[in-house]
Image (tube, rainbow, N blue to C red):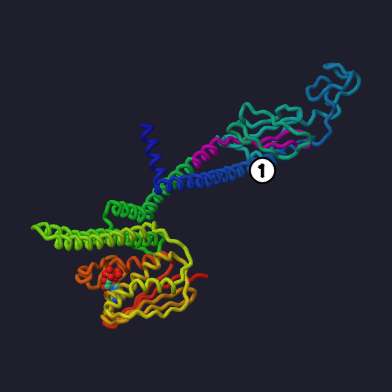
Amino acid sequence: MHQVHGEGFVQLTKSLRGRFALWLGFLLICLLSGFGITAHQLHRINQFEQIDQELKQRVVALSASVRARPGFGERPPPPPYGDRMGPPPPGASPGRPPRRGRPGPFELHGPPPELREIRLLPETSSLFDESKTNGFYFAIWSRGGTLLKRATNAPPDLPIPDRLDGDTQTHTRMRNDFRESFHFTEMSECVLAGRTIKSDLAALRRFTAWLVAAGATVLGLGLWGAWLLVGRAIRPVEDIGATASRISAGNLAERISVDETDTELGRLAGVLNSTFARLEAAFAQQRHFTADASHELRTPLAALISEAQVTLARERTAAEYRQAVEACLEIAQQMRRLTESLLQLARFDAGQERMKSEHVDLTRLIQARVELVRRSASERGIQIICDLAPAECVGDEERIGQLVTNLLTNAIHYNRDGGEVRVTTGTEDGLARLTVSDTGVGIGSEDLRHIFERFYRADKSRARAEGRSGLGLAICKAIVESHGGKIDVSSEPGVGSSFIVRLPAAA
Ligand code: ADP
C-alpha cells in the first residue's frame, strides 16, 4: 500500500501538472502559515493587552486604597526583637523582651501600618465583584510578606510575587490559567489584581482552530483551482505530445491544431507544424527519389535484357553478336552514369562529398572544358563563343569542371543545329560569375521552376529515349551550393536559355 502511494507521488512529481501543483501547495502552505501565525499572535496580543489594561486599572485602585489607610507613610517603628518583620540588631539575643521602664514601640507609634486594617475605597470595591465566576480578585501583602487582605474568590495557592530592589513598576505575570498584575508601594507592600483567563484561552484556541480550518480550506481550494488551471494551460502541450507521437507512428500529414497563435505554446506549435511540414516534404522527396531512381534503372535494364534475349533467340553471325554486345555495352555505360550520378547526389545529401578548397582560374578551366565538347558541337554546326574576363574562385576544380561540362553539354544538346553557345566570365560584388547561354529550344515558365529537381525533364519521353537522366542540373545545383554559391536560369522558349553561376571569388 505504501509502495503504491510512493509510486503515485513519484508519478505526480514527474508530470508538469503535478509538479506545479506541489510547488503551489508548498508556496500556499508557507504563505498561509505566515498569515495564520501573524493573525494568531496579533489576536493574542490584543486580547492580553485588554486584560492587562483592566488589571492595571485595578492595581492602581488597590494602591490608592492602601495609601488611604491611616498611618501610611509613617516611619515604621523598629520591630520588636524576635519579630519576623526584621532581624534583631547585632548583639541582641532573639526573643528577648523589650527593656522594662521604657515604652515599647506600639505604645509610642501604635501598631505598624501593615497591621492596621485595610479598607477598600468604595470605588475600588466596585471593581472586584467577588460573586462573578470570571471576576477579578485581589491580594495585598505586607512588606514582610504577610498576606494582609485578599478577595474570597482569589485562588488559594496565591504566592507573593518576587520583587527587584526598589522596583515600583506595575508588572504582569501568568500562572496556569491566571493573569495577574502587581505592584509594590513605597512602603514595600505588594498589591495584586488578577483574574482567570480560562475562557479567553478557550476563545484563543477556538480562533486558532478556525484559522487552521480556513487555511486548510484555502489550501484545498487553491490546489484544486491550480490543478484545473494548469490542466487547461498545458492542454496544448499534451496535444503537441499526442500529435508528435502520431507523427512518429508514421502519419506525417498530422498537424497540431493551433487556436491562439500569439501565445508561447501557439508559437511553438506553429514552429513544430512547419518542421513537420518540412519533414513530410523531405520524406515525400525521398520516396519520389527512390521510386524515380528504381524506375530510371529499370528502363535501361529492361532494354539490356530484351537486347540479350532477342540476340539469343536464334543463331547470329559474329558481326550481329558484336553489334548486340556493343548495344548492351552502351546501355550498361548509361546505367553506370546514372548510378554514379545517384551516388554522387546521395553523398551530397549526406554531406560526404569531399570538396577541395583550391584556387580555380575559371577562364583556364572553361577553355579546357570547351575543348572537350567542341567536336560534338561542331558536328551539329554549333558555334561556341568564349568571352572570358579574368575570374578566379576558391573551390574544387574537378567539381567546378563537372559543372561547366554539364552546362555546356546541355547548351549543345538543347540547341538548334547551327546555333550558338556563348560562355562569359567576370566578377561582380566579390563573386566570380560564369554564364552559359544558348540559342536552343528554351524552357517554358512552368518547367523553369522544376528543372533543378532530380529526374525532372521538360520533354520526358524524348529525353529518356535519348538517355538523359534528368540529374545533371540537380548535380550542378548541389556543386554550386556546396561552394556557397548560387545558380540561376533565365529562358525564353524558342529563343534560348541562359544559366548564370555565381561563386565566391578568390581574394
Ligand atoms: P537531362 O539529363 O535531362 O539534361 P538535366 O538535369 O541536365 O537533365 O536537365 C533537366 C531538364 O532541363 C532537361 O531535361 C531539359 O528539359 C531542361 N534543360 C536543361 N538545360 C537546358 C537548356 N540549355 N536548354 C533547354 N532546356 C534545358
Q: Nearer the viewer, residue 81 or 104?
A: 81
Residue 239 position, x and y percent, is 33, 55
Identify which residue is drawn at 29% across, 82% down: 419
The secondary structure type at the circle numbered 1 is: helix
Identify which residue is drawn at 88% across, 24% down: 103
Residue 303 visible to an observer of this rendering: no
Q: Amino acid at mark 1?
A: Gln
Residue 127 position, x and y percent, is 63, 40
Residue 340 visible to an observer of this rendering: yes
Question: Disc 1 beta carbon < 8 A from ligand 1?
Answer: no
Mark 1 is surrounded, within 10 Å at the Cα level, by few (under 14), some (14 to 19) or many (20 or more) other residues, namely some
From what the image shows, is residue 68 above or below residue 466?
above
From what the image shows, is residue 180 above or below residue 27?
above
* Horizontal side, residue 289 vs residue 138: left or right: left
Residue 482 position, x and y percent, is 41, 64
Q: Nearer the viewer, residue 244 or 196?
A: 244
| Quarter of the rendered structure image containing ligand 1 | bottom left
Q: Can you name the residue that lies furthest to the left here?
A: 314
Residue tagged by mark 1?
57
User: Which of the image's four quarters has the N terminus?
Assistant: top left
- Residue 310 in magenta stretch: no
Q: Which residues are magenta?
A: 180-208
Q: Nearer the viewer, residue 4 or 354?
A: 354
